[in-house]
Image: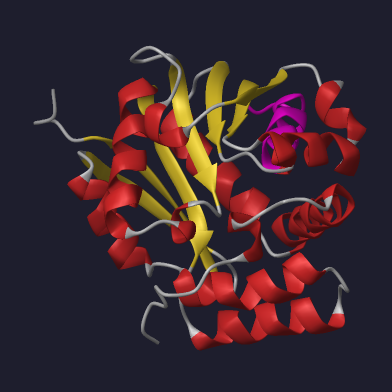
Amino acid sequence: MDRLTDARELLDGPLDDELAVADNLRDLRRINRWLGGVSLSRSAVRALAGDAEAVTLLDVGTGGADIPMALISRGRDGSPRIDVVGLDSRAEILNAAVRADPLVTETAGLELVLGDGLALPFKDDSFDIVHCSLVVHHLAPGEAVALMAEMRRVARAGVVINDLDRQWLGWLGAWLIGHLLTGNRYTRHDAPLSVRRAYRAGEMADLLRAAGLEPIRTFRGAVGQRYAIAARAAVDVA
């Protein structure tokens, strides 16, 4: 399957229906929970955190902040304690996140911030780990490398990229989710298109290397529809 580059997801366009956007964020929360997105991020974060008792994490393109909330909750059960800043470039998304789940403003250890992932409003080495999920497939290769370079700049321990794998089984699953399990127009349109726009794991690893990062572990979903890559700054990058 060739990567589709000339199509646009609805979430990349005007977001003038907050109720529909909030419902889409709820769909994404269920997808992340049911289809392994949360567990993939948790494994990749653990690979970078090692035996640390506490970790600071920046989540770029946080959307509904469901993965940060899940990581924080798991941290209370014996994993490293995680404090998260969830950043998104669109105020409409952050507003819809609160509508989708008011707990995002009540969860201890979670702060939501408006900001651009391509120009992160943080100093170098501000966080232990910088994470993003279901973001990179929205970007052209040059933009993806620029994002990853910014993530590397503010990360002390490393970077986690969690995204879809471009393959037909994943596309079929996304189509079925969009047409059988939800009536949300954003989810129905964007879910299968996201798979067509996604990078294969090897392609993502090449983008990470171009951004001065070296993949150390790749974690895959149960049927290969998704992966998370943990990466550290390459030794020859200042």
Looking at the picture, tell me which residue is in the foreground, 165 or 139. 139
Q: Residue at left 45%, top 42%? A: 160
Taking the image as shown, residue 115 lies to the left or right of residue 18, namely left
Left or right, 105 with reference to 8 = right
At x 70%, y 65%, the residue is 35
- Say if residue 80 shows up in the picture: no
Which quadrant does the N terminus fall into? bottom left
Residue at screen point 30% across, 41% down: 146
Residue 236 visible in the current orientation: yes
List x then y, in percent, for residue 168. Answer: 52, 87
Residue 55 percent across, percent down from the top left: 54, 19
Residue 11, quarter of picture: bottom right
Is residue 70 magenta-colored? yes
Q: Check if residue 19 falls in the magenta segment.
A: no
Residue 82 is situated, as x and y percent measured from the top left of the image, at: 63, 22
Q: Which residues, given as a range, are shown in magenta? A: 67-81
| Nearest the eye: 138 or 133 | 138
